[in-house]
Amino acid sequence: MNFQQLRSVREAVRRGFNLTEVANMLHTSQPGVSRQIRELEEELGVEIFVRAGKRLTGLTPPGEALLPTVERLLLEADNLKRAGQDFSASAQGRLSVAATHSQARYALPQVVRDFRAMFPQVSLHLHQGSPRQVAEMLMSGEADIGVATEALASYDGLVTLPCYRWTHSIVVPPGHPLLDLAGPVTLEQLAEHPIITYELGYTGRAHIDEAFAREGIAPDIVLTAMDADVIKTYVELGMGVGIVASIAVDAERDRHLRLIDAGHLFEVNLTRLGLRRGAWLRGYAYHFIESFVPTLTRDAVEKAVQQSAHGLGQGGGDAAVDVAGVAPGHTDI
């Protein structure tokens, strides 16, 4: 048994059983991949894959049972390599961060800038995607660190830690009727106008829908997008009222829009940082995390990972940092 055989099995599953893609990924030939898989099956005494002629079409029941062990062995092998690199060249290497559009655009730029200044020899890769895609990149090992508001905490294979809380804001063009209200805007008043906001599953959209549903109000959502800048563009065109993350609005940059606080309308959101359970982090990865959330020191992160490994919970305590005027002590969401 060798690691190339294990990699061939893992990549065959990840690439939808397409051995041509597996061969390209592993920089070998298709017959070489088939041979590695066959040799492993012969050594184990079971067939791992269902076949139709020479094609792989799925996993057999033994294959489904063996796959988690294959994944774990390869993860630990990667951890050994990273551990050695961490001691031999702590300021060199690669760091992959996956984040949603809002986090990558508004929360991470200063962190990325400071990290690059501190670790110029580390190759930093920033991937963007939906919360589900961020979680999947972490689970597959494509990303070392993930940042998203929704979904991360629902994956058993991830350790998640609270980062910071934030609220939503309403954005409108100058002269909009909502600006003339005597008191705070209500959901009823907001629903009198067409609404532009995030797609389902993005940037606290669930809390927006829940707030309207609790009041029995059906808002007229005319347009959705993944990115706040897109939402604000269409608000400027007069197509509707925007609901965006407060961190996505800047008075100087968005001087053609007006901001209305919506913290009283929608539940406070919690951004989380995710790590793959059992994965080894290089020393500079801990610096990146602490630069993003000062309370998430290496000790705090390692403690949370250890607690998670022993089934004591997902987070490292309520280490969230309050922003956007959110009062400390708000209940986790």
Image (tube, rainbow, N blue to C red):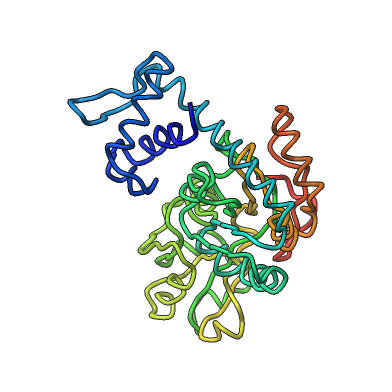
Residue 329 at least partly seen: yes
Query: Residue 159, relative to residue 131: is it above or below?
Result: above
| Badge count | 0
Q: Residue 96 versus residue 168: which sits nearer the camera? A: 96
Q: Residue 107 versus residue 177: which sits nearer the camera? A: 107
Q: Residue furthest left?
A: 53
Kindly indicate the quadrant of the structure image that contains residue 265: bottom right
Q: Residue 236 versus residue 144: which sits nearer the camera? A: 144
Q: Is residue 51 left or right of residue 181?
A: left
Residue 214 at least partly seen: no
Residue shown at the point (58%, 52%) measured from the top left: 146
Q: Is residue 100 left or right of residue 161?
A: left
Q: Is residue 328 left or right of residue 241?
A: right
The image position of residue 303, as x and y in percent, is: 79, 40
Residue shown at the point (75%, 50%) measured from the top left: 330
Residue shown at the point (36%, 22%) measured from the top left: 48
Residue shown at the point (54%, 64%) measured from the top left: 102
The image position of residue 9, as x and y in percent, is: 40, 32
Kindly indicate the quadrant of the structure image that contains residue 54: top left
